[in-house]
Image: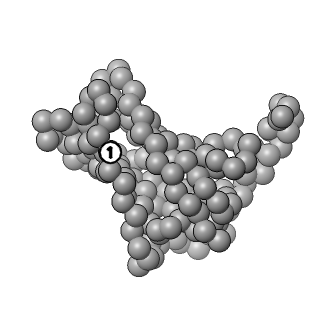
Amino acid sequence: MWNNTSKMIWGSFFAALLSMSITGCGQTATASTTSIGKETAVIAPSRVKMTLTYQPSPPVALKPFYAKVNLVTASGQPLSQAKVVMHLTMTDMDMPPQTMTLKNDGSGHYSGQSVFLMAGPWKITTDIMSQGKTMKESFTVNVSN
């Protein structure tokens, strides 16, 4: 298992690697024209419809991963005043999850980017906080090399 020193060392290493990967070592990252993945769920009991779109599909290790979440209430209105946080967890390894807070783009749209550190199966858990309540939804993606 991980002791506190190991967690701190690995956490620092992954944070540095993530930082370098996101910034592209000084280059500006732009979305490519690769396939777009899409997952949709209705979150019980609130019946909020969440649509996750991401690019590229499948995600590629150590390359920018762009995510967009669209939230619509049960009455069809955009859920505009939420805080949306994604946790990226590799399911085959015992390593701390990567967390990204999505930017509120307005009208129920939220976006962000991150980098998957390794190829393999990853679980994307989305936490949606709105009006004092937290909703969760998870999807699994297979990250390629």
Instruction: Tell me, yes or no, if residue 21 can be seen here.
Output: no
Residue 114 placed where, x, y %?
55, 56
The front one of 1 and 87 is 1
The front one of 35 and 83 is: 35
Q: Which residue is drawn at 73% across and 51% down?
A: 14
**In the image, farthest residue toward the top:** 132
Q: What residue type is labelled 1?
A: Ala
Colour scheme employed for the rendering of this structure: one colour
Quarter of the image for residue 104 reads: top left
| Vertical side of 91 occupied by 21: above or below | below
Residue 106 x %, y % = 26, 47
Residue drawn 69% across the image and 50% down it = 92
Name the residue carrying label 1. 41
Q: In which quarter of the image is residue 35?
A: bottom left
Instruction: Provide residue 143's location: percent of width, then percent of height.
Output: 58, 63
Q: Residues within 10 Å of mark 1 (few under 14, many from 20)?
A: some
**Residue at 46% of width from left, 61% of height from top?**
66
Q: Label 1's element?
A: strand
Residue 73 at least partly seen: yes
Q: In this view, does 43 lie above or below 31?
A: above
Q: In which quarter of the image is the C terminus?
A: bottom right
Label tally? 1
Q: Would you say 143 lies left or right of 35 here?
A: right
Q: In this view, does 117 lie above or below 41?
A: below
Which quarter shows the N terminus?
A: top right
| Residue 77 figure quarter | top left
Question: 123 or 54, which is in the foreground?
Answer: 123
Of all residues shown, which one is farthest toward the bottom? 33
- State left or right for residue 21 relative to residue 108: right
Name the residue furthest left. Answer: 75
